[in-house]
Image (cartoon, helix red, strand yellow):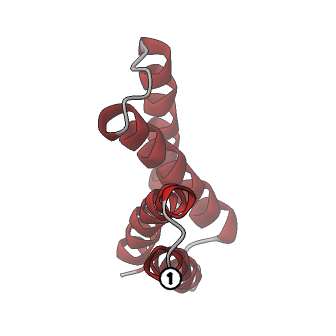
Amino acid sequence: MEWIALVGAGLCEVLGVIALRRVTLNRTLGSYLFLAIALGSSFLLLTLSMTKISMGTAYAIWTGMGTAGSTLLGMFAFGEPKEGRRLLFIGLILVSAIGLKTLS
């Protein structure tokens, strides 16, 4: 259950990045509400995951998911450069997260 919460926290973190972009483009109450809900949910789920997963592992995986997810989102949804080096380093983040999961 804790790992599901951690994955959910990472996905909410990516939604938070989308919300940040939305706020910069459109400063409405709805945009700010979306931002608060996305990031609030992310922190809540991260906190729940830390009941059984060590803080260092949970935080590393959460930030890795947020980094990889937002970079991929930027590349495929918002037209940011799709360089092989970027994909290589995203792969390294994912391999590191899998390694941490294996050790926990």
Q: Is residue 6 above or below residue 57?
A: below
The residue at the point 39 percent across, 63 percent down is 11
x%, y% of residue 52?
Answer: 54, 81
Whether residue 24 can be seen here: yes
The residue at the point 67 percent across, 70 percent down is 55
x%, y% of residue 28?
Answer: 50, 75
Q: Secondary structure at mark 1?
A: helix
Q: Nearer the viewer, residue 76 or 23?
A: 23
The residue at the point 44 percent across, 58 percent down is 18
Whether residue 103 can be seen here: no
The quadrant of the image that shows the N terminus is bottom left
Query: In which quadrant of the rendered view does residue 76 lie?
Result: top left
- Amino acid type of the residue that numbered disc 1 sits on in the rendered structure: Leu
- Looking at this rendering, what residue extends furthest in the top direction? 84
x%, y% of residue 30?
Answer: 43, 80
* 99 left or right, relative to 7: right
What residue is shown with label 1? 29
Q: Nearer the viewer, residue 31 or 94?
A: 31
- Looking at this rendering, what residue extends furthest in the left direction? 76
Query: In which quadrant of the rendered view does residue 57 lie?
Result: bottom right
